[in-house]
Amino acid sequence: MILVVKNSVVVLLAAALTGTTGGVAAQATSTSSGQAYPVKPMRIIVPFPPGGATDIVGRYIGIKLGETFGQQVVADNRGGANGTLGLDLAAKAPPDGHTLVIGQTGNLSISPSLTKVGYDTLRDFAPITMVVASPHVIATHPALPVRSVKELVALARSRPGELNYASTGAGSAGHLGVELFKKMMKINLTHVPYKGAAQGFTDLIAGQVAMIFTSVLSTQSFARTGRVRMMAVASPQRSPSAPDTPTLAESGFPGIELTSWWGVLGPAAMPKDVVARLNTEIVRIMGTADARDRIGALGADIITSTPSQFADYIKLENAKWGQLIKETGARVD
């Protein structure tokens, strides 16, 4: 698959996030049959394989919802097609609140503008709340003979087409980010798409690929153990969880800022009181010290919202990515 970009310089801003933490008032919750909700085990679809950022977020929320509701909440990994297969499965599930899904930048706001998907982002889902956001970081194999992004660019220019990079899928935020970076720097890197971040990191650690551009949330655990080297974060300021890693701007490459975000949704037509109950509980869960210790410490900003705020944000992101893709002529073949 090839991404074609016409413009030479594009500012990539994937999220202009605020620290909104609002929820909705708790309400008595019941199903259409009048039974208390939830009435049976739940599942939360994770549209990527185990081990990546989406899996980390989805499993954590599933465990905590299970503790809250006294029902089993199963994390159901359904990877493939840059997360769109799992999202499509969720869209077609019964809208009774017993099937949820973790949506993110790529499968909600990028893929629908790049390729045919089996769902309508704005029509087929009931947004519940945003949960986290995390800036992207360029990470390399420790044996790669570079210590900075400038050295990485110089190496790529001296070996055109020889260095390859992993992404979480063709058309993912990391894929588009690297392709735009390539265009700006006039370098040639070879794209190797995977079904999720965990598989990409497996090959990066094994030396099968030279680098990856994905979230700090996905990268931090590998960097702390020295299995990968974080070169620069694509955020205005350094990440609090990786204060020694410079920003791309500090590294001499301003103009690329990329943050991915994740949120919880259900199928459209979910009862409003079920959406309200889920919003209240997930916002509470993400506001705990435990969430900050387990999720925030890995390089994520915990950012929750009301259902309507999340819906409005998805609309803005869809419009922004759609316009960017249109202006650049980006496509996945």
Image (tube, helix red, strand yellow):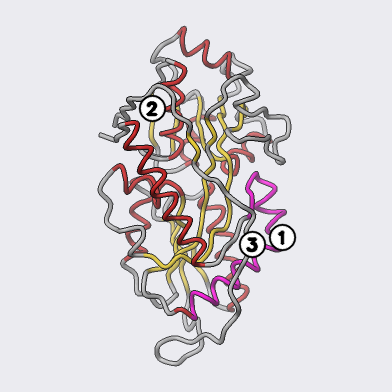
Q: Position of residue 148 (x, y in %)?
A: 62, 18
Pick whichever of labels 3 and 2 is earlier in the sequence.
3
Q: Which mark is residue 191?
A: 2
Secondary structure under the numbered disc 1 in the rendered image: helix
Residue furthest top in the image:
158
Q: What residue did someone put label 1 on?
A: 290
In the image, 14: left or right of 85?
right
Q: CA distance from mark 3 to mark 2?
A: 37 Å
| Number of numbered tags placed on the structure image | 3
Q: Which residues are magenta?
A: 273-302
Q: Position of residue 218 (x, y in %)?
A: 56, 42
Q: Position of residue 49 (x, y in %)?
A: 44, 49
In the image, 263: left or right of 1?
right
Secondary structure under the numbered disc 3 in the rendered image: loop
**Amino acid residing under circle 3:** Thr
Magenta stretch contains residue 281: yes
> What residue is shown at x 72% (from left), y 40% (from top)?
240
User: What is the quadrant of the C terminus in the image?
Assistant: top left
Q: Dot 1, crowdedness within 10 Å: few (<14), some or many (≥20)?
A: few
Magenta stretch contains residue 56: no
As drawn, 31 above or below 74: below
Pointers 2 and 1 in contact (CB under 8 A)? Answer: no
